[in-house]
Image: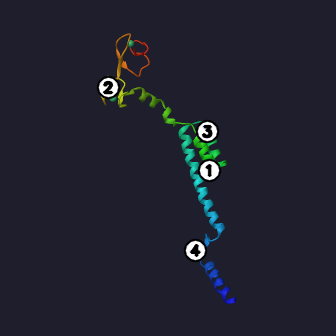
Amino acid sequence: MFSETEPLVSITSDSASMPGFYDYFSGIEDLWFLVWLIVLFVWIVIILRVVKDITARTTNFWWHFFSVFVIIVLTPVIGLPLYLALRPLGMKYDKMPWREAILSSMCSCSNCATLNKIEHICCTGCGELLQITCRECSQYHSHTYGYCPNCGAPNIES
Ligand SMILES: [Zn+2]
Ligand SMILES: [Zn+2]
């Protein structure tokens, strides 16, 4: 009986004098602590990613507040799917004036989808006619225009 317990005592006294990595994470409580550290790390990373995502989508303070609130209070398990479902579609730069300016100076070919300058008469990708003739003044203009830039007649193809 005594001879069985003696080696155990000597092992524990050895590990107490020389603590290594495995001594710190040997207990089940220590393992849970490690799991919680990883969960906390993932949680914080998701919060940072959500902050980055929502600030790229909107400048509205209440959207910023709601997004972080939902991840912290409801945890990423419920909060993240909720955020992904409710977040505003489209990024801020999609609505910037310079983007509109560039898009309005281009038109897409209805035949091959190549982007052409709005003044082009024929598509540079397939040769398709991009312009239409105004019914009122007979000037060519882009098929994307709502009204003739020359006389203001509505762009109605007939
Ligand atoms: Zn084309
Ligand atoms: Zn016209």
Q: Which residue is mark 2?
A: 128
Q: Give the CA distance from mark 3 to mark 1.
A: 19 Å
Dots 4 and 3: beta carbons under 8 Å?
no
| Local crowd size for mark 4, using a 10 Å CA cut-off: few (<14), some (14–19), many (≥20) | few
Quadrant for ligand 1? Answer: top left
Q: Give the CA distance from mark 4 to mark 2.
A: 76 Å
Left or right side of 22 for 106: left
Q: Residue at x 61, y 38 (%)?
A: 63
**Is residue 80 positioned above or below 135 on the image?**
below
Kindly tell me whether mark 3's CB lies below 8 Å from ligand 1. no
**Is residue 44 positioned above or below 59 on the image?**
below
In which quadrant of the rendered view does residue 99 lie? top left
Precedes in sequence: disc 4 or disc 3: 4
Q: Residue at x 64, y 70 (%)?
A: 27
Precedes in sequence: disc 3 or disc 2: 3
Question: Which residue type does callout 4 highlight?
Answer: Gly
The image position of residue 111, as x and y in percent, is 35, 28
